[in-house]
Amino acid sequence: MESVRMRAAAGDAAVRQLALAGICELAVTRKGPDLPGAGAPSAGEQRDASLKIAIVDESPIRAAILADGLREAGLTHVELIPETHNLLARIYALDPDVIVIDLESPSRDTLEQMFQMSRVVKRPVAMFVDQSDAASIQAAVDAGVSAYIVDGLKKERITNILDLCISRFNAFSRLQSELDRAKDALEERKVIDRAKGMLMKVKGLSEEQAYALLRKTAMNENKKIVEIAQSLITAAELFK
Amino acid sequence: MSQTRLRIGYIPLVDAAALLVAVDHGFAAAEGLAIELVREVSWSNVRDKLNIGLFDAAHMLAPLPIASSLGIGHVRVPLIAPFNLALNGNAVTVTPTLHAELAAFADGDPADPLVSARALARVVADRKAKGASPLTFGMTFPFSNHNYQLRYWMAAGGVDPDEDVRMVVLPPPYMVESLTNGHIDCFCVGAPWNSVAVESGVGCIQHFGSELMLRLPEKMLVVRQDWADARGEVLAALIRALARAAAYIEAVERRSEVTASIAERLGVEPSLVSRTLNGVLKVAPDGTMRSTDRYILVGRENANRPDPAHAAWFYAQMVRWGQAPLSQEAAAIAQSVFRPDLYDAALGRSAPTDNGGPRDGIGAFVGPDFVPDDIAGYLKAWNLKRTGRPRLSIVR
């Protein structure tokens, strides 16, 4: 079955149709428990753990953060698709129930093509389809994530997955800005140290005195210490 | 007077020129509009952000508001298109290998789309006989001229786009790379990507979009129906700003000034933009040039006035390729998406009596004349062709 599906993904039309019969059967099996009234809640939760999730994200760190979060939540079938070449073929081969994609990925348009394959019975549906939940759509867009789910899955079953994705995407943004700030701070420190060293050498000051001089000048000029340090370095370069 | 703030989403392409110039050359400000342009990476994002109200308006593929208003492939959100940002502007680019194959299999001048389409059918059959993998064609979105133009072209030669070849959606910035590394053999996309492929020596422009259809809306200004109802005055001001910007772009003496500012927005060389606007293009890496006066029409020949007949044509393509079922009701909804009445009202103009264009408004290189009120009959004429009846005469 798997190899047939792989070959189908490679595009051989005849094989694809054969495989689709199989995929279609699979979809029906999975759809079964979602029929109204079927399955107890506890059984439903168990089945959620079996949901297969594909993450399409060119940022390997964010994808890893997201995958970890999903696994911690008990969703064990998580696959990362870091590279977007042949995206549809990979998705067909994986046959996921949920696809999570970074909103900044131009490959979203490629995913939209899945709506068009009239022969594919198992069709994905964009998260945006249910507009009744405006708050969650807004949160997803703000966080920069979009999710596609397979038709037939009840929305409630994946709400927690989407929530998790949103919070992980937000966590990544925070991490990214903290990292940027830390980098900036390190750079500033280097500049100040250099300026301090220059003052110590030229004016024969101690480290403490040099720093005090920089700070005093910054206060007088109503500027940041790093700005004064940078001007000092620039001026020194000019005098060379 | 305080300025009305608007957020408008767009994809960096030459066919967004009227919108970009309206903002960058003061036409929007003169109408009391402070426009924030938001650069997007996918049509899905543009559509979704317009749908949920993050954008007031958007630069959008002309068939997309019809799909959205009909609820095809996605949630139904009624959208309207009161301004056509550009007619034409696409091209079909092939690898040098496929270019040579088409020339080898051609029974005439392969620059003629009907000749190249028949040659394509022979290339496809030849590859099938040799057991080679099918040709792969890149286009930008399921509801796009790129999709419909490629399909129209290959079907004219007898190639079934769903059975004989592979059609893949690729983001425009990935097109050239995909052509380079052999993932695709051909693509149909807007400017500047065809020229970028030629410049990099990996592609030859086989056909201009305007050689396939003389007059086809490429991108429209699109807003939500409810937004247009609530903010009619603002929309009229926006239409006026766009119309002035479009006329400004067409004024030849200002071309270099305008191309520089458009190029800056798109992040490409100004020469790539001016080639497109002037319709003088390098079509092969060896320096072969081809020119046309209709490569892209930003403001001339009454290009900006939406034509419901074009909307009907797009709907007919959706039906032809199995994206939508045929119904009178859907055809009527499709036509009502394009709004010449709002365009006329904003500019104080009356409906023109004659566009001076092709007699069915489209001017396709082959096939029956398009009849907006008889889509079933139009499609039937195609079906007759497909079952091997004698070809209909070429309509130009």
Image (cartoon, coloured by chain):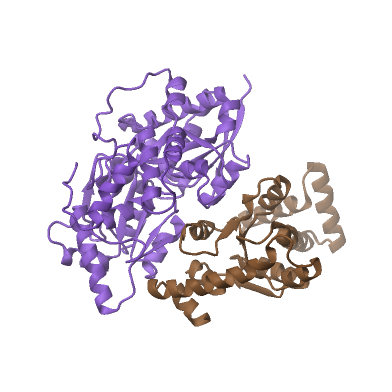
Chain colours: A brown, B purple
Q: In this view, does B78 lie to the left or right of A8?
A: right
Residue B176 in view in this figure: yes
User: Does residue B275 sit above or below A72 in this rendering?
Assistant: above
Q: Within the image, what quadrant is residue B115 found in?
A: bottom left
Residue B367 x/y as whole percent: 23, 47
Q: In this view, does A105 lie to the left or right of A177?
A: left
User: Which residue is drawn at the image coordinates 44% and 49% (left, top)?
Assistant: B324
Closer-to-camera residue (A116/B135): A116
User: Which residue is drawn at the image coordinates 22% and 51% (left, top)?
Assistant: B289
Q: Within the image, what quadrant is residue A29 found in?
A: bottom right
Q: Name the image quarter holding the C terminus of chain B.
A: top left
Residue A119 x/y as whole percent: 46, 63
Residue B199 x/y as whole percent: 32, 58
Closer-to-camera residue (A49/A201): A49
User: Which residue is drawn at the image coordinates 43% and 17% (left, top)?
Assistant: B348
Closer-to-camera residue (B220/B242): B220
Q: Name the image quarter holding the N terminus of chain B.
A: top right
Residue A206 in view in this figure: no
User: Does residue B174 sit above or below B3 in this rendering?
Assistant: below
Residue B81 x/y as whole percent: 47, 34
